[in-house]
Amino acid sequence: MKPRSLKKPLATAGGVLFLALVAVVIYAQLTYSSSYLLLPDNPHALAPLVKVKDAQKGDKGSLYFVDVIERRATLAERYLPFLRRDATLVSEQEIGPSNISDKERARIDAASMALSKKTAEAVALRYLGYKVVVHSHGALVEQTEPGSPAAKKLLPGDVITAVDGVATLEYSHLSALITRHRIGQRVRITFTRNHVQHTAQLRTIASHSKPRVPMIGVAVTQAAAIKLPIGVTIDAGNVGGPSAGLAFALELTDKLGRDVDRGHQVAATGELYLDGSVGPIGGVKQKVIGARRAGIEIMLVPSGDNASEAKRYAGTMKIIPVKSFQQALRALTTAERKP
């Protein structure tokens, strides 16, 4: 009798392993993690976005603001970060409070951008000699530190109006009132949210940088009603947050007759405060990479850690660290005029 032939297996053990690996890779590329990626975006030219009556005709230079794209990271991007060397992986808590909806987060970002525009307009017009009326009405919460006492009670967009019954109409008063307490003591915070007043008891904790100094874990800026003497319109589209303030103020100043860019392609980033000072921002790596790829020649960034990080990714692009709007103007004024 003829021996029965053995059938060839459909796949070898190695083939099965390869198919399993392919399936894992596809799954990792299509499945989103709980982390987020910060990615470079193209710089935004400010000339068509900032409109003001009696604007001067522009020169060959241009001013830009820069932002960052935020999106959820896939499992592959989370565990294989070399797939996107231009990206930064961050937790959901670093993007924003986890106890609010996406809709509420979008509203907060939009409100932050609206304040950034008004602040930029006020700073630029004041510098140019216009009369700007500012009514301060509290300390606007920009962000809370994860796990801090403030994070349990306060949200970005809240306005702190008093500490233990003492008014904080000027936001700089908040820190002074908090530091009157000992670490571990409770303070009574009065704040408004969506025009409704609330109170909360918060226990102070030690500052990370100064262990003997009490804090509640909140970053604030000035909440104010601003009245401008002329009409200004700034259209930033759906971009949110406060980091374009410096760029907006520079473009408005340029529009009203000052040669700010001196013929160069200039990008700027930095949160602008009503006193003209410039505060640090996030996503510096991605903003610098985006500007460098677009051929920007000069980029202004907040001094300190932001500037140090910016220089690591700038290539041949010139980085100018600044602490204030006035310093930014002086730095650009001394740049060689480009024909």
Image: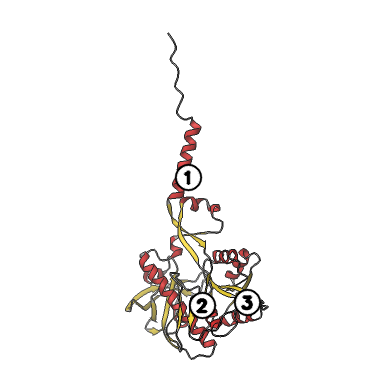
Residue at which label 1 appears: 25
Q: Estimate the spatial distance between the alpha carbons at disc 2 and disc 1, rounded to whole Å.
A: 44 Å
Amino acid under label 3?
A: Gly
What colouring style does the render use?
secondary structure
* Figure quadrant of the C terminus: bottom right
- How many residues crowd around disc 3 within 10 Å: few (fewer than 14), some, or many (20 or more)? some
Please say whether residue 139 is visible from this viewpoint.
Answer: yes
Percent coordinates x, y for residue 337 in the rendering: 66, 78
Q: Residue at x 57, y 85 (%)?
A: 257
| Residue farthest along the left direction in this orientation | 196
- Mark 1: secondary structure: helix
Q: Position of residue 138 (x, y in %)?
A: 41, 82
* Label whose residue precedes the other's in the sequence (2 or 1): 1
Residue bearing mark 3: 263
User: Residue 104, which numbered label?
Assistant: none
Residue 325 relative to residue 205: left or right: right
Residue furthest to the front? 57
Q: Residue at x 54, y 82 (%)?
A: 255
In this rendering, the count of numbered labels is 3
Could you tell me which secondary element the residue under label 2 belongs to? helix
Question: Mark 1: which amino acid?
Answer: Val
**Residue 55: x, y in percent?**
52, 84
Mark 2 — residue?
A: 248
Q: Are marks 2 and 3 in contact (CB under 8 Å)?
A: no
Please provide percent x and percent y for residue 263.
62, 77
Residue at figure coordinates x 47%, y 37% from the top left: 19
Q: Amino acid at mark 2?
A: Phe
Asked whether residue 216 appears in the rendered view, the answer is no
